[in-house]
């Protein structure tokens, strides 16, 4: 879920939460590509204009609904991720794996993946200590795949481990991958200045 703005009008926040809750309930019973904005409006009991005050379209609604969990996963890039929070996200995905599997495949996959890549790229942008060997967008794709692939395989039952074991593996592997993507510092010239 998205983080609440403490200055936001409580009615506006409640409306946004109602729209997101309606969307989630629909995702549990329908495939993403079958859900229409009108279905969300009817379930949430809001008007079309109210919906568009909060979201550009259904894809934007899906992306916003993943903001909180994906920010936590993106924090793996900076080494700032708390293992317990990553584990908590994985446990949440596991407890809601029918929903997660429906969102991590088919038409929704493009939006889900793009959202994770954007969060990874933002995390790389905050990590100003090192230059990257490749453009940040490419690095973000690489890191997003390194997070997303094992999670989706785990949720589909391809292999079993605890959420704690997976969280620890992601923490260690993403840190190592992020480090490997960093460019080596420029060598010093004979005069001691950077060349």
Image: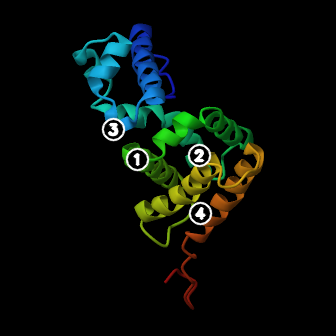
- How far apart are labels 4 and 1 at the CA level? 28 Å
At x 43%, y 64%, the residue is 138
Residue that label 1 marks: 106
Quote the CA–CA distance across marks 3 and 4.
34 Å
**Residue that numbered label 4 is attached to:** 178
Q: Residues within 10 Å of mark 3 (few under 14, many from 20)?
A: few
Q: Which residue is mark 2?
A: 73
Q: Which residue is mark 3?
A: 33
Q: Is residue 77 visible?
A: no
Q: Is residue 122 left or right of residue 167?
A: left
Tag 3–tag 4 contact (CB < 8 Å):
no
> Which of the two discs, 3 and 4, sits closer to the camera?
3
Please report contact status of discs 1 and 3: CB closer than 8 Å, yes or no.
Answer: yes
Among the two numbered marks 4 and 1 on one chain, the one whose residue lies closer to the N terminus: 1
Relative height, residue 30 to residue 136 (above, below):
above
Query: Residue at 29% of width from left, 28% of height from top?
Result: 36
Instruction: Please determine whether, in this image, residue 99 is positioned above or below residue 177.
Output: above
Q: Is 26 on the left or on the right of 164, as rendered?
A: left
Which comes before the other along the chain, label 1 or label 3? 3
The residue at the point 55 percent across, 88 percent down is: 191
Q: Residues within 10 Å of mark 1 (few under 14, many from 20)?
A: few
Quadrant assignment, res 87:
top right
Residue 79 visible within the image: yes
In depth, the one of 191 and 112 nearer the eye is 112
Task: Please determine whether, in this image, residue 52 is positioned above or below residue 167.
Answer: above
Residue 183 rendering spot, x and y as whole percentages: 54, 73
Label 1 element class? helix
- Estimate the spatial distance between the alpha carbons at disc 3 and disc 2, rounded to whole Å: 25 Å
């Amino acid at each position: 879920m998205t983080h609440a703005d403490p200055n936001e009008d409580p009615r506006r926040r409640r409306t946004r939460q109602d729209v997101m809750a309606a969307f989630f309930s629909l995702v549990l019973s329908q495939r993403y590509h079958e859900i229409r904005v009108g279905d969300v409006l009817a379930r949430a009991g809001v008007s079309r204009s109210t919906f568009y005050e909060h979201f550009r379209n259904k894809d934007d609604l899906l992306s916003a609904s993943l903001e909180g969990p994906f920010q936590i996963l993106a924090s793996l890039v900076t080494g700032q991720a708390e293992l317990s929070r990553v584990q908590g996200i994985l446990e949440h995905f596991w407890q809601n794996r029918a929903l997660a599997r429906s969102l991590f495949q088919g038409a929704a996959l493009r939006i889900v993946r793009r959202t994770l890549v954007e969060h990874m790229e933002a995390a790389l942008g905050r990590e100003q200590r090192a230059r990257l060997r490749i453009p940040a967008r490419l690095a973000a794709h690489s890191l997003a795949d390194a997070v997303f692939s094992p999670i989706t395989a785990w949720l589909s039952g391809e292999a079993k481990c605890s959420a704690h074991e997976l969280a620890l593996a992601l923490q260690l592997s993403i840190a190592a991958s992020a480090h490997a993507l960093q460019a080596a510092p420029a060598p010093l010239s004979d005069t001691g200045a950077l060349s």
